Amino acid sequence: MRRLYEVHGRALLAYACAFLGPSQAEDVLHQVFLQLLRDGGTEISSPGYLFRAVRNRALNDLRGRSREVALDGEAQWLESPSGSTETALALQSALRTLPDEQREVIVLRVWGQMTFEEVAAVIGVSPNTAASRYRYGLAKLNEVWHGRT
Amino acid sequence: MDELETLLRQFRPRRPGPLPDVDAGRGSRRLVRVVLSGIAAAVAIIVGWRQPIHDSDRPKAAVTLGALTPYAINEASDLDSLLTSTSRAILPDVERSTGVLHALAKE
């Protein structure tokens, strides 16, 4: 289980950050793994199971404390290739302008390195819908990213 | 669009902090179990020493509701055996020939 945490921890944290602020996202990630450890190392058939578990818990958490998310929204959870905090925060900010359903697909596809079929299985839509959300999300992100000054 | 995708992939999510110790909760539960077992054993020993005392003078049960509640929550599976052993130690012995219940039965 701890090996899975090492391997998928970054992508899972990014996915939780699609819904929550970074510190809440990390709490959710820990809760998911601690539960799995308490359950005696539940057999994980695919990483998709972990992403679904994080999604469910993040959405539950979000319902409970949506007001706090905004306060934590600007903490850094991405690392830019140049090491620039400013660039990383700018991209996070651009991602925040997307609707949740587009943002989560982008995170799963880009940092979860999933196919549209895998993305669709995690979020419970058809692969076509997942692909469509990705395209729309990317187009909007492109506008925001290049429109920033 | 592909350009943006390539750009995005150059960013990396940060590594989450280490998992908290999953055994932390178990440790405290183990401590509670040990303490409660100690209390139960002490009660049994004290009651055993005071056995010659008449049933009417017997102290009331030392296992309180307050002590049993956390045990029932944390160790529900062991509660039955604790209650059985404790009740044997602190309840009147109805089979003892000199016991008050035996005398009452004769009347």
Image (cartoon, rainbow, N blue to C red):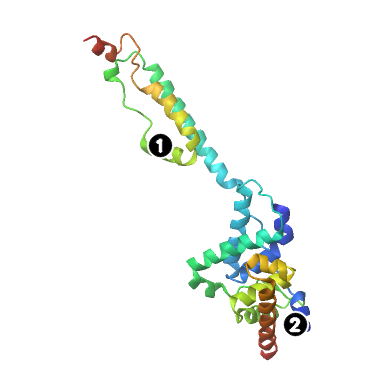
Residue placed at 63% from the left, 62% from the top? Answer: A52
Q: Tell me residue B80's x, y (percent).
A: 45, 31
* Whether residue B28 can be seen here: yes
Q: Amino acid at mark 2?
A: Leu
Residue B4 is labelled as 2
Q: Tell me residue B104's x, y (percent).
A: 24, 13
Q: Is residue A114 left or right of residue B106?
A: right
**Label 2 secondary element:** helix
Q: Quadrant of residue A3?
A: bottom right
Q: Against A143, is B46 above or below?
A: above
> In this view of the protein, which residue sits in the foreground, B57 or A39?
A39
Q: Is residue A138 left or right of residue B92?
A: right
Residue placed at 66% from the left, 85% from the top? Answer: A140
> Label 1, on which residue?
B67
> In this view of the protein, which residue sits in the foreground, B1 or A80?
B1
Kindly check if marks 1 and 2 are in contact, taking CB atoms under 8 A apart as contact.
no
**Label 1 secondary element:** helix
Q: Against A35, is A142 above or below?
A: below
Residue placed at 58% from the left, 74% from the top? Answer: A73
Q: Amino acid at mark 1?
A: Ala
Give how far apart the Cα atoms at labels 1 and 2 are: 63 Å
Q: Mark 1: give few (<14), some (14-19) or many (20+) Cα within 10 Å.
A: few
* Whether residue B17 can be seen here: no
Q: Quadrant of residue A108?
A: bottom right
Label 2 chain ID = B
Label 1 chain ID = B
Q: Is residue B84 left or right of residue A59?
A: left
> In this view of the protein, which residue sits in the foreground, B105 or A10?
B105
Mark found first going from the N terminus, 1 or 2: 2
Q: Tell me residue B5's x, y (percent).
A: 75, 79
Check the picture and name the quadrant holding the C terminus of chain A.
bottom right
